[in-house]
Image (spheres, coloured by chain):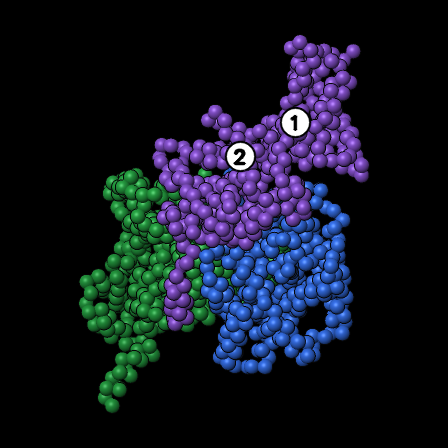
Amino acid sequence: MKKYLILIIIFFLTGCSSYIELNDLAIIDTISIQKEDNNYKVTISYIEKIEENNLNPQTKIIEAKDTNINQLFNNLSLKINKKIYLSHLNLLLIDDSIKNKEFKELINYFLNNQDTREDFLIAYSNNINDLMHNNKFLEINDLVKINHQETSKVIYTTMYDVIKNYYEKKNIYLTNLTYQDNNTLPIGIITFINNNYQELTEDQSIFINYLLDNIDTFNYTYKCQDNNYLNLKILKGKKQELNNKLLITNEINIISNDCHLNNQEINKIFNEYLEDNKIYTNKTLNINNTIRGNYENK
Amino acid sequence: MFTFFYLYNFFSFNNTNIGDTMNYLELLKKESNNSSDYVYKTIRLNNHILNIINIETITSSNDINNFILKRISFLSDLKITDLENYLYNYLPAVSITKLKDYQELKNKLLNGFTILIIDDTSILSIETRKDLTRGVSEADYEKTIIGPKDAFIEHFNTNLGLIRRRIKDINLQVIDYELGVYTKTKVGIIYVNGIVKESLVKEVKKKLENINIDGIIDSGYLRKYLNQSKSLFPSLKSTERPDVASQALLEGKIVILTDNSPDVLILPTFFVDYFHASDDYYQKPINISFIRIIRLIAFLIACFLPAFYVCITTHNPEAMPINLLLSFTKQRQSVPFPAFLEAILMIIAFEILRESDIRIPSSLGTAVSILGGLVLGDAAVSAGIVSPIMIIVVAISAISGLLMPSIEAINSIRWYRFILIILASIFGGFGIFLGTILILANLAEMKSQGVDYLYPFAPINFEELKDSVVKISSKKAKKRNPLLSNNKIRGV
Amino acid sequence: MKINKIEVNITFLILSLSVFLLNFSNFTPLAIIFGFLLSFFLILLTEKLNLTKYKLTNICLLIISLIILPIYLNKLTYFISNNILKDYSGIVISILLLISSLFLIKKGYHTIIKVVLLSSYFIILILLLGLLSSIYLKIDNFTINILKDNNLFRNTLLYSFLIYYTYFLTYGESSSLVNKKTLLISSCCHLLSYLFIIGILGLTLTNLYEYAYIVIYKKINFLNFIERIEFMFAINYLFCFYYFFLFSFYKVKSILKKVIKKDKLLTLTLVILSIIIFTISIL
C-alpha cells in the first residue's frame, strides 16, 4: 500500500506543466517576415474566435519588431493573451529583403524549435500588407495548390524544400503573389539565386516545373493566323536527366485544332515553345510527345 | 469432570448404538427446538412400530403418501418378520439407504429425505425431495442468436443433467463435496477423464477440501479459495449456459457446479476466452473472424479512446488535423470544466445510469431512460456544461465496452479506462505509454491455476493462434491445447 | 515455462531497433554491412568458445551496461521531450522511466518477455503501416554520395558493438539462442530503413535532423484528414527503445543476483544504482 501512495504523491507533485486547454491557444495561421533597417518585422494573423454560423474563423493581426527572431517570438506573447502555437502554421510570406543571412536565421529558428513543423507553404510577395489584411483562412494555400494542379504555373514549396535547397546551395523557387483589384493572384515563380531574386514569366515557370519533375496538367494555346487557335492540354510530363541531355516525355490531348495542323507540326510548335523558355540549364532538350485526339492526320 | 463426561456423551453420539433410537426423536425435538415444520408420525403395524420423520417444507407429501404410506398400508394384513429388509427391498423408491447413526439421520433429514425408524432397531431414508426451483429457461445475460438457448438453474441435479445430455461418455466424472458448516452446499467438480490433466484435478480437489467457511450461498464465494488473482482482469470464468460448459469440458478444463447457484465456474481460463462467444463455433469461420476482430477493436476503443481524446486536446494538439482542431475549440468555448474533469464526470454519470438500469423495476424503466437520455444528451450540452464531442467519445467507449460476451470482463474494462484517463491527463502521450505497459505487465504475470494466462499470444503457439483472434479452419485434425491436456489429437 | 525460439528471436528484432536512437545518421550502408559481418563473426566466436561461462564476461557486461544506461537514458528523455511531451522537464521523465523499469524488473524475466511479445504484434503492424509514406519516395535522392562515409571505421565498430550487446541481452535466461537468420533480418531491416529514409528526405536532410525516422511520417497527408500521425509512430518507437532500456537494466540485476543473495539488499543496490544513473544522465 505504501508503494502506491508514494507513486500517487509523485504523480501529483509533477505539476502537469504541458497541460493546456484548447481555448488558450493562439492558433497562428500565417506569418509574414520582412526586414527593415536591421530589424525584423513580423506580422501574425491568428485565430481569435470561431462563430457558430460562420465557416471561416475570425482572425486578428498583430505586428512586432525586433533584431533577433527568437526574441521577437518571445516578445510577441506579450501582445496576445494566449499561448503562441505554431504547429498549425499554414503560410509564410517573405519579401525582397530576406537574403542569405535572414534565411539562415529563419531556418535555424524553425529547426531548433520543438513545436514547429516544417510543412507549411512559403510564398513571395511585393505587397505583403495587402495580402495579410485581406487573406481569409487557408485561402492562399488552396489557391497555390489548385493552381499547381491545374495550370502548373506556380510551385508549392514547403519549408523542407527551402532547407534542402539552402544547404545544398541550389536555387530556391517560390510562388510570386500580388494583390490586384481586391484579389490575390499568383503571377508565376520567382527564384532566389546568388543572393538575389529573379522574377520569371509564366512560360518560364512551366519550364521550371519540368526541371523539378513537378509538372501536373496545364493548357497551352497557340495562335496560328486570324483568330484560329490551337488548344492543347498536356496531361503528364516527365523528365529524365542524362549527361548532356534532358529527356522530356509528354502526353498531349488536343482540345481544338482550328488550324488543321497534323502531328508533326504540333510537335514542332510545342518543342519550340519549350526551347524558347529554357532557363537554368545548359543541356540539350530531347522531347517526345504522344498526341491524341487529332483527326487531321493524313 | 462431570461436565467433561456430559460433553463427551454429547459429542460422541456418532458412536452410540442403534438401540438408542428413541433418544433420537427426543434429541431431534430438542435440537430443533420443536420447529413447526418437522412432522413426526408413528404407525403401528402388527407388532412393529414405525416412526416417520420428515420436514414438510422440503419434502413432497404426495410422494410420501403414494409411495410410502400407501405401500405400508398394504402390509397390514401380512405377517413379516424382517420388516427392515422387506421395506428395503420392496418399497417403490429408487434411493433407499440404511443409516447407521444420528449424524447421517440429521444430514438426510435436512436434505429432504424421509426417515423411517423401524422398531428402534434400524433406520431407513427414502428420497422424497420437493422441487423448489424454477424450470429450465432462457439465458439471462449471455444471449445468442444461433444455438441452444437453455440455461442452468439453481438445482444441482438438473444442471448436471443438462451437461450429461451433451457429453454421453463414461469418462465424464463428478466428485462431490459438501462445503460450508451451516449450509452444507453440494459442490461438484466435473471433468472428462481422458482429456484433463490429473495434476490440475488434484490441485482443485485440495483447494476445495481446505475450505472452512460458514456458508456458501453462491458459486462466487468459491472464487477466493480457487485463487482468483489480484489483478484487474478476471481469471475464473463463470457462465450460465450448458453448451459453453460442455465446450470447456471437451478442451480439458474443469467445471465446478454449486447447488443453489445458476452460475457455473470454469477453470483454467485464458485471456482469449473473454473474446469468444459460444456461437462462434456454430457459424462460418470467415464471418466469425470479422466479428472477433470487431470485438478486439471494441476492447481497444473502450480502454483507450477517452484517454486518447484527453491527451490530444490538452497535451498534443499538433496531432489533430486543422478542421478537427477548429471544431473542437468551437465546442469547448463555453465549457467551464477542464477536459479531463469533463471526461471523468461523464463516465461517472454513465456508470450511475448503467447501475440503476440493472436494479430498477421495469415499471419505472421508461421514465428513467428518457430522463437519462435527455439530461445527458441535450440538456447538458445546451446548458453549456459539457461539450457534444465529449458525450460522443464517452458514449462510444461505453457502448463498445459492453460488447464482450462476459460480464466480468466488462466490469474490469472500467478500471482500465479510468486509470488511463488519469495518466493521460497528467502526462499526455507518455502517460498512455506508461498505462499500457502497466496493464500489459499485469496481464503477463497472471497465471490461472498454474497455466499462463496469455497463452496463444505470449508463449506463442501458431496452431492455437488460428482460433484466437481470427478463426481459420484447417483441414488437418485439430490438436488440443497442450497446456491443458496430454491427449493431443481430437476425435480419436 | 520454456521460452521458445520464436520469442527470443522476436525480442531480438525489437531490441535491435534501439540502434535508431543512438546516432541514426552515422550508420551508413557500408557501416551496416561491415558491422554486421564483424558482429556475426564475434557471435560465432562466443558460441564456439563458450565465453559466457567465465566470470570475466559477466563483469564486462556489468560494466558496459552501467556505462550504456546513463547515455541511453539521456537520449531517451530527449526523444520523449522532443516528440511526445513538449514542455515537460526532462528530470521528471527520467525519474518515471527509472521507477517503472524498477517496478517491472521485479516481476522476472518471463513476464518481461511476455510483455515484449504482446506489444510486438502491434509494433510490427504499425511499423508496416509506415510504409504508406513510400508514396513520397524520389529516385533522385539515391545518388552515389550515400556510400560516402568519413568515419567508416568508427561507425562499423559502433554498430557491431551494439548488435553484439543486444545479443547478450537475450542470452542467459533461456536455453534457446538467437538464430543467425534473425541477425541477418535485423541488419537488413536497418539497411532498408536507412535507404527508405534517404529516398524520402535526401541525404542532407537526414544528416540534419536528429530524428529523421520520425520526420518521414510528417509528410503523410491523405485527403487532408489522415495527417499528422507521427505521434502514433513516435509512441511506437518509444516502446522499442524502452524495452532495450528495460532489458539492459535486467541484465544488471541478473548479474548482481549471483553475487548478492538477499532480496532486500538487491533492491537497495538497484535503487542506489538507478539514482547514480539518473545523476550521470543529467550531466
**Who's the residue at 45% across and 42% down the image?**
A44
In this rendering, the answer to whether A214 lies above or below C87 is: above
- Which mark identifies residue A126? 2
User: Chain C hue?
Assistant: blue
Q: Callout 2: 10 Å neighbours few (<14), some, many (20+)?
A: some
State which quadrant residue C180 falls in: bottom right
Which image quarter holds the N terminus of chain B? bottom left
Q: Is residue A290 visible?
A: no
Q: How many marks?
A: 2
Mark 2 touching mark 1, by CB under 8 A? no
Chain label for disc 2: A
In this rendering, the answer to whether A112 lies above or below B4 is: above
Compared across the picture, whether B478 is left or right of B300 comes to: right
Residue where numbered disc 1 is placed: A203
- Counting from the top left corner in percent of width and height, residue A174 is at 59, 37
Q: Secondary structure at mark 1?
A: helix
Instruction: Report the mark closest to the observer, 2 or 1.
Output: 2
User: Chain A hue?
Assistant: purple
State which quadrant residue B89 falls in: bottom left
Which image quarter holds the C terminus of chain B? bottom right
Looking at this view, name the residue that lies furthest to the front. A37
User: Chain B hue?
Assistant: green
Which one is nearer the viewer's eye here, C194 or C86?
C86
Compared across the picture, whether A114 is left or right of B228 comes to: right
